[in-house]
Image (spheres, rainbow, N blue to C red):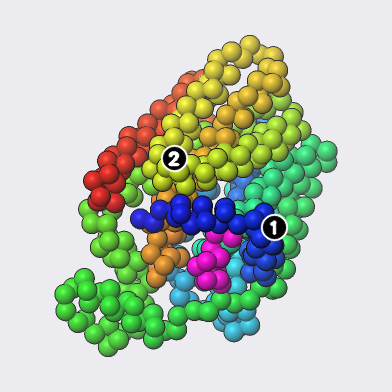
Amino acid sequence: MNQPNEAGQQGAASNSLGDWLRDAWQIYTRKPVMVIALLGFGAGLPYLLVFTTLTAWLRDAEVERTTIGFFAWIGITYSIKVFWAPVIDRLNLPVLSRWLGPRRSWILVGQLGIFAGLLWMGLLDPQQDLWGIAVAALIVAFASSTQDVALDAYRIEIVEDDYQGAMSASYIFGYRVAVLFSSAGALYLADWYSWTFAYTCMAFLMVVGVIATLWSDEPKHLDAEQRGRVDAELIDKLMGRPMHLAQRPPWQRWLLGAVICPLLEFFQRNGMLALLILGFIAVFRLSDITMGVMANPFYLDLGYSKSDIARIAKMFGLIMTLAGSAICGVLVVKWGLYRPLLLGAILVAGTNLLFALLALTWDGSRPPLSWLVLVISADNLSGGIASTAFIAYLSSLANKSYTATQYALFSSLMTLPGKFISGFSGWVVDGWGYTEFFVIAAVLGLPAILLVMVLMRYHRMGRL
């Protein structure tokens, strides 16, 4: 797997500050880099609106915590996007694809679906039409995950490899700003006006992403003949003889190239260790995803206002997450991938025990805000470290010939188990309490710690 080029980093650092600033300006003012920040905003906006912000709305409407927990299953949509990723990767939409191109047309369809779903959610009352909100949230999640698949492919294809770092940084910045709007911004609007007003405003913010899509350029693609050659070479190598893929029926060529080849390449490259890698991906985020569903209901039940949550848990929490990401970026350069992964896994599991301690000491009155600041700081700092290390690890696993489908597989698998288990979070809280729930969430982090240690051992042996 690719490791950061420390020598290259040191060489870049040797330039004068003026040269560095001039180069940075030239890089980050390139049209594709600016576009991806706006598209990142459109990608980040809907996620929390069907996850933690939605759970705050439901709890504020006095929906039972057990029911709120089941809403976490809507997020499974993001975890199964790999099933339709091959369609997005290779199917051209009528009319739109001729106008915008394959990537931008799918991105636009996803954005319009998000807009419609959020607008519909804002018109509904959880106490009167809970099922309607569930269906609307599902539409938002499906459209958002569809947009993500197309956007990941667009980001990789629109610029040369040298600019992928800048594209990732710009995308993350836009995504994080959107998360701030959809969490703290939505909570403030709900506190000052209403949840209907908040979700309606969030829907119209998707205009930012739509404008970016129309402003952007379509990346160059491999044509059907080039794709066919890459697919045929992989299949022939695997089978040990020519399979004459071009002579097979179109549906077989599509199935083999879009669905089978990405999986074959990954397993061919990693052998039996591929199963260990996939298992690690599946369990790494169990702890934080499970805990995240009950975070906002926990804050509200402790007596904090929505504005308190927006100011501390969202705005200050974002700063700590970015700080954790920055720290991890340095650690990856100095240590490689595996030690930061281990550190992140330990910290995420450990910080859940701070939530358990806060719940244990709660006597019915609202704890001091300083306690919330402490817990939020630790949780978001550790989350920033863990997520940055994990994204770097997943990026190192993907083969650029099949990046869209392989990355969709990894990103789907990393959230699917956590989303399923988190559906029972409200049931655990109602049945046992918050303290027991957060302890269980911490224990769910142990498999990730153990597996990363196993992967480190194989890495030292030169097998990874």
Q: Residue at left 79%, top 48%?
A: 197
Q: Residue at left 71%, top 22%?
A: 369
Is residue 57 visible in the rendered image? The answer is: no
Q: Amino acid at mark 1?
A: Gly
Dominant SS of magenta comes to helix
Q: Earlier in the sequence, mark 1 or mark 2?
A: 1
Mark 1 sits on what residue?
Answer: 18
Q: Amino acid at mark 2?
A: Pro
SS label for mark 1: helix
Compared with 162, 314 (above or below) is above
Compared with 27, 186 (above or below) is above
Judge whether residue 82 is colored magenta.
Answer: no
Q: Residue at left 63%, top 36%?
A: 320
Q: CA distance from mark 1 to mark 2?
A: 32 Å
Task: Identify which residue, 80 or 159, lies in the foreground.
Answer: 159
Residue span colored magenta = 154-166
Compared with 119, 384 (above or below) is above
Rendered image: mark on residue 302: none
Q: Position of residue 402 (x, y in %)?
A: 40, 68
